[in-house]
């Protein structure tokens, strides 16, 4: 009998603790949702458009200009200032960064670590930007990592480009600087520290390890070898 009572008491304690924790979690979630709702209501009054405000996370210190459209599942965290008439597509994360006006961002873009994006840029799907400055008119539309970079006006960053900013253990991160109107071909790697002069072009699939003067073409890859008819007389 004593053993039975002992089990009952333990069960009661476990149930009490379980439901107590659930109640606390429910209370905090309720408070959080109310605060989040208030923030979104305020932004809506200021002219920000939410396509699905129930799926968006906005920190309390975030400032967003009128006319900006925010799609579902966007997360804007920390101290962010976002200008007017931006288009922020789904699954984009922006952290502790400044965004100008008339930018198209996402889907699935990640901007963080005190980056600054000026105006009229295009930052596409699966583009990550860290601790970088992108000037007016920059385009990086697909699958790109931009780390510790300064990118001048009207540059075009091709698909799959990597700004290799870290040399390994024990080394600090280095910066890559691009002048105005630089074109970086797809699948290229820019190994910092580098300076690329304005009006230059980097051929696709190049690995660039040395700085480039303005108005230059840089290509760094092995020459293609094609053997015509190689399999014509071979048996599979």
Image (tube, rainbow, N blue to C red):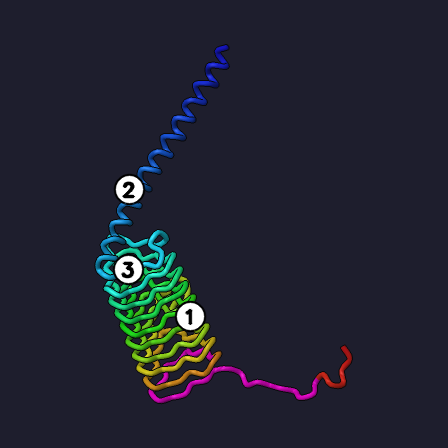
Q: Which of marks 2 and 1 is nearer the N terminus?
A: 2
Q: Give residue 202's position: percent from left, percent from top.
A: 42, 83
Residue 20 numbered tag:
none
The image shows residue 76, relative to residue 224, as above or below, that is: above
The residues bearing labels 2 and 1 have C-alpha atoms spaced at a distance of 38 Å
Q: What element carries label 1?
A: strand
Whether pointer 3 and pointer 2 mark residues with C-beta atoms closer than 8 Å, the reply is no
The residues bearing labels 3 and 2 have C-alpha atoms spaced at a distance of 24 Å
Q: Determine the image quadrant of residue 84.
A: bottom left
What residue did someone put label 2 on?
A: 31
Q: Which residue is drawn at 40% across and 69% down?
A: 124
Residue furthest to the top in view is: 1
Q: What element carries label 2?
A: helix
Check residue 30 for magenta coloring. Answer: no
Q: Residue at x 28, y 49 (%)?
A: 37
95, 29: nearer the viewer: 29
Check residue 225 for magenta coloring. Answer: yes
Count of labels in the image: 3
What residue did someone put label 1 on?
A: 144
Q: Give residue 47's position: percent from left, percent from top.
A: 24, 61
Mark 2 crowdedness (10 Å alpha carbons): few <14, some 14-19, many ≥20: few
Mark 3 crowdedness (10 Å alpha carbons): few <14, some 14-19, many ≥20: some
Q: Give residue 17's position: percent from left, percent from top.
A: 39, 28
Task: Specify the principal SS of the magenta part.
Answer: loop
Q: What element carries label 3?
A: loop
The image shows residue 41, relative to residue 184, as above or below, that is: above
**The residue stretch that appears in magenta:** 206-230
Q: Which of marks 1 and 3 is nearer the N terminus?
A: 3
Mark 1 crowdedness (10 Å alpha carbons): few <14, some 14-19, many ≥20: many
What residue did someone put label 3 on?
A: 96
């Amino acid at each position: 009998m004593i053993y039975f009572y002992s089990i009952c008491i333990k069960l009661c304690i476990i149930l009490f603790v379980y439901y107590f924790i659930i109640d606390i979690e429910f209370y905090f979630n309720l408070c959080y949702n109310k605060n989040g709702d208030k923030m979104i209501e305020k932004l809506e009054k200021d002219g920000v458009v939410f396509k699905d405000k129930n799926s968006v996370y906005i920190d309390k210190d975030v400032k967003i200009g009128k006319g900006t459209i925010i799609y579902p599942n966007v997360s804007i965290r920390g101290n962010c200032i976002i200008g007017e008439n931006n288009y922020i597509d789904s699954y984009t994360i922006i952290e502790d960064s400044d965004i100008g006006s008339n930018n198209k961002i996402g889907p699935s873009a990640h901007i963080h670590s005190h980056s600054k994006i000026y105006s009229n840029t295009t930052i596409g799907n699966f583009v990550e930007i860290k601790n970088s400055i992108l000037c007016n008119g920059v385009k990086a539309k697909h699958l790109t990592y931009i780390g510790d970079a300064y990118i001048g006006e009207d540059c075009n960053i091709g698909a799959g480009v990597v700004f290799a900013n870290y040399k390994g253990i024990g080394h600090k991160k280095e910066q890559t600087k691009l002048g105005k109107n630089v074109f970086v071909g797809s699948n290229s790697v820019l190994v910092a520290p580098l300076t690329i002069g304005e009006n230059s072009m980097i051929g696709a699939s190049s690995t660039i390890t040395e700085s480039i003067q303005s108005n230059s073409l840089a290509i760094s890859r092995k020459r293609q070898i094609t053997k015509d008819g190689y399999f014509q007389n071979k048996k599979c």
